[in-house]
Amino acid sequence: MPRSAPDAHAARVICVLQGPSGDFFWRLRARLQARGVRVVRVNLCAGDRLDWPGPAFDFRDTPQHWPMFIERLMREEGVTDLLLLGEQRDYHRVAIAAARRLGVTVAVCELGYLRPDWLTLELDGMSAHSRFPREPAQIRAAAAGVPAPDDRRRFDGGFVREAVADVAYHLANLAFRWRYPHYRSHLPGQPVWLDLGIGLHMLRDLATRPAMTRRCACLAASARPFFLMPLQIESDFQIRAYSRYASVGDALREVVASFARHAPAHAHLAIKAHPREVVWRSWRRLAGELARAGGVADRVHYLDGGDLDRLIAASRGVVTVNSTVGLQALQRGRPVKTLGAAVYDVAGMTHGGDLDSFWSDPAPPDAALVRDFIALLAVSIQVRGSFYSRAGSTAALDEFAERLASGSVNRIRADA
């Protein structure tokens, strides 16, 4: 991750593949073109067409023909860079393989490692595929002189716009499936039903929020030492691609069993549901069954809501597969044990021992190393902004366009 000034702008041709993200990439096109970049777009489904109203190549053939189609397109259009919203979707993984055969640079964007109002833009991929340094000495050296980022929230997440864009994308795919008859979503099940399930979960959360807020506050303020396990979304590629678990339930089984066998008798475990999991995918029953089977039913608490920041601050440590909650916990000085691939799983930051040892002797993070890690992360592969809020997306678009047009993705900004 060299600390050098961005290269002078060179002629670039960027091919864009995305997913539900509203008009973010369509607006990015104008900024890239203003910098002399030609943008090639491929629509895989009607939702893509909805989000990209201009000229594009439409792929309507079977998945078996996709490898030949995307490699030929990149070769014939002279593509220099491939920009993807996430790298683990089936179509995207095939496109990445073709890009590597052709020497095309791959850039991936997603929600930020830092939360809440940051986005990620990095080469090759995220988590296990990230190029971000993992060795403490490398991190310290690269972060020398880099200031800590301003962690005050600048932009809202644009939740209503996000929800509308996501539902519109999936409804378009359902209504106009005949236009792209062979398209297959990466999501398990019908995406529209998943949207409905998330919406119902959030509505239920509104009804139970006061009681859950009181329950979480009581746990955080009590003298009982507790560990926190934030659950992740079942369909998330962080689980499906970057962990050894086939399901969130598998991770839950391992954690509760380990806690029952090895945690001190006075310790408690708080399991926090993900706010955007579908309503029918509740892990409450499984958590209760596992706790009873392990003889710790009175020490395992399932929380569907509540103040996450307060729980992190009051906990003895956080156990996670690879959620960004782990990074938030490190920033607050709390011990963290990861069970899957995570960009922040660095020696000296996360607990180096096994899960069983975490309950009795959780290793606290090296505060100076965490500060260097966050500072380096912010100036190299994070972009301040959001996909959906107007102000946040405008700020992010300008930075995305500059980094992509200049070939400076992953580099530390000279003015950092």
Image (cartoon, grey):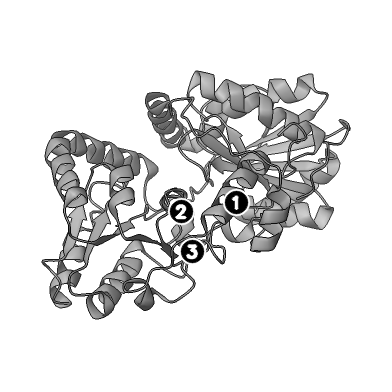
Residue occupied by mark 3: 350
Residue 275 in view (yes/no): no
Residue occupied by mark 2: 330
The kind of residue on which mark 3 rests is Thr
Depth check, front residue: 296 or 127: 296
| On-image quarter of the C terminus | top right
Q: Residue at x 80, y 57 (%)?
A: 101
The quarter of the displayed image where residue 288 is located: bottom left
In the image, is residue 136 above or below residue 389? below
Tag of residue 373: 1
The span from disc 1 to disc 2 (Cα, nearest Å) is 10 Å
- Tell me whether the residue at label 2 lies in contact with that at label 3, contact meaning CB atoms closer than 8 angstroms: yes
Q: Is residue 152 left or right of residue 311?
A: right
Tag of residue 121: none
- Tell me whether the residue at label 3 lies in contact with that at label 1, contact meaning CB atoms closer than 8 angstroms: no
Depth check, front residue: 293 or 412: 412
The kind of residue on which mark 1 rests is Phe
Query: Is disc 1 placed on a helix, strand or loop?
Result: helix
Residue 380 point in image, percent of width and height: 68, 42
Q: Residue at x 21, y 34 (%)?
A: 203
Residue 124 point in image, percent of width and height: 69, 52
The kind of residue on which mark 2 rests is Leu
The span from disc 3 to disc 1 (Cα, nearest Å) is 12 Å
